[in-house]
Image (tube, rainbow, N blue to C red):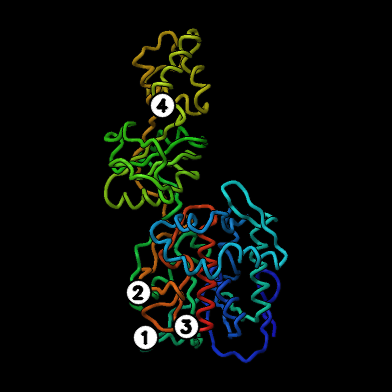
Amino acid sequence: MRYPGKCGGTVTKKENNPKKRIIVVGGGAAGLVAAARAAELGQAVLLLEKNDCLGRKILLSGKGRCNLTNTKPLAEFILMYGPNGRFLYRAFQNFFREDLIRLLENHGLPVKTERGGRIFPATDDAADVVRVFRQRLEEYGVEIKLGAPVSALAINDGQIKGVHIRGGFHPAEAVILATGGVSYPATGSSGDGHRWLKAAGHKIVPLRPALVPLIVEEVELAASLQGVTLKNIRLTAFACRANEANAALVPSRQVGRAILGPKPPVKVIESRIGEMMLTHFGLGGPVTMLMSLAVVDALSLGPVSVAIDLKPALDFPTLDRRLQNDLSTFGKRSLKSILVGLVPRKMIAPLARLAAIPLDKPAHQITAYERTIIAGLLKFLPFNISAPLPISHAIVTAGGVELTEIDPRSMASRLVRGLYLCGELINIDADTGGYNLQAAFSTGHLAGESAARG
């Protein structure tokens, strides 16, 4: 029996004699892997997807290229999830990077490795990844219903009985929830699963945006810097107002999730070297995104500020001597000309305004005090953070189902028999680099296998 697929192709339902009826809710990364694995083990699987297309968030991942996973060894991989990473050991032992790569290559999709150990499909096309997963669903006879939003779980006496959909009911002996978080709601991640699980008695760790740009209070300054991209800078976040922070608090090393070492100085939340972008509302780019969850959590407790070190390779005395030499050597040039060699052109006028020095002031007239102000801004350009962008703009949802209520050996709910949870629905999130997708693939695979064999 053949079922039409609205995103191309059809899905074939093979005739078999199943032992168990399993429903998978959600056709994202975790749900696709879970459905295929449960069907591979001989069970009758129904995949319900509220969208008219499978894998919509996969198609957006990695800017449409799909950063599948990462080359980091397992011990370092686990660190990327923070303290909750330990929960994933069993899932990664069951299905990890090598298994994923083998699965893709067996279906004609080779992969490649890029900077930072990021692994992508060799075609640079996320649609090819979705195609592979659709082929697996077809191969193992998974029944798919698109445009089929679930309205509620059917639970009786602590046992899952199926799911309710608009205009009907689907019975099941096991249900796998892979409904995602609440970021990018257009992909279908609207928090449905969290609401159902809360109603079933599960604790939901508050949902927050992770990997998200940050809004600053100094909007006029930010707007004047809009579009500036900064490479090899240090961004440091402080648990205080900008006027209470100073360069002496900036640690000499990087501080953050998955970065091992001594605890940071008091008031320092995170400090990382990387690339960032300035926007009309504040701060974006890779290093900002990596630090955003720690900033969001700190904002719930009090004020947060950040500072940009534009010259992290130079300490203050070295930078001051360089400035002194430039001002002396090119004494007839203007401050504007001196700064051209130090910062992007669009930053020159805003920095001069902050230093209260006219751009056309000759270098030989700049005082030692003014030189110190300029060097200070290059080493410590502060902003007060007012908020992150809304969670709908986040790449990943932090928070989710409390991990103590999920069996890490099977992804089974400890509260409802026959119910399995996976993917972004649970309280797992990581830095960028392929870690979030790998967690979705691995927890989905374990959930599908456990539901089939349980």
The image position of residue 42, as x and y in percent, is: 61, 85
Tag 2 near tag 3, CB within 8 Å: no
Q: How many marks?
A: 4
Per the image, the residue denoted by label 3 is 163
For the N terminus, which image quadrant?
Answer: bottom right
**Which sits earlier in the primary sequence, circle 4 or circle 2?**
2
Helix, strand or loop under label 1: loop
Which numbered disc, 3 or 4, marks the residue closer to the eye?
A: 4
Q: Looking at the rendering, which quadrant does residue 370 occupy?
A: top left
Query: Is 454 on the left-hand or right-hand side of 143?
Result: left
Q: What's the mark number on residue 158?
A: 1
Which numbered disc, 2 or 3, marks the residue closer to the eye?
A: 2
Please, which residue is most extreme toward the bottom here? Answer: 17
Say which amino acid is labelled 3.
Val
- Cα distance between the residues tagged 1 and 2: 12 Å
Tag 1 near tag 2, CB within 8 Å: no
User: Can you say whether 47 is above or below 426 in the image?
Assistant: below
> Tag 4: Cα neighbours inside 10 Å, few (<14), some, or many (≥20)?
few
Q: Looking at the rendering, which quadrant does residue 204 occupy?
A: bottom left
Per the image, the residue denoted by label 2 is 202
Say which amino acid is labelled 1.
Gly
Residue plotted at (62% across, 80% down) = 40
Residue plotted at (44% across, 80% down) = 419
Residue plotted at (38% across, 72% down) = 195
**Which sits earlier in the primary sequence, circle 1 or circle 4?**
1
Query: Is 18 on the left-hand or right-hand side of 397?
Result: right
Per the image, the residue denoted by label 4 is 315
**Which sits earlier in the primary sequence, circle 3 or circle 4?**
3
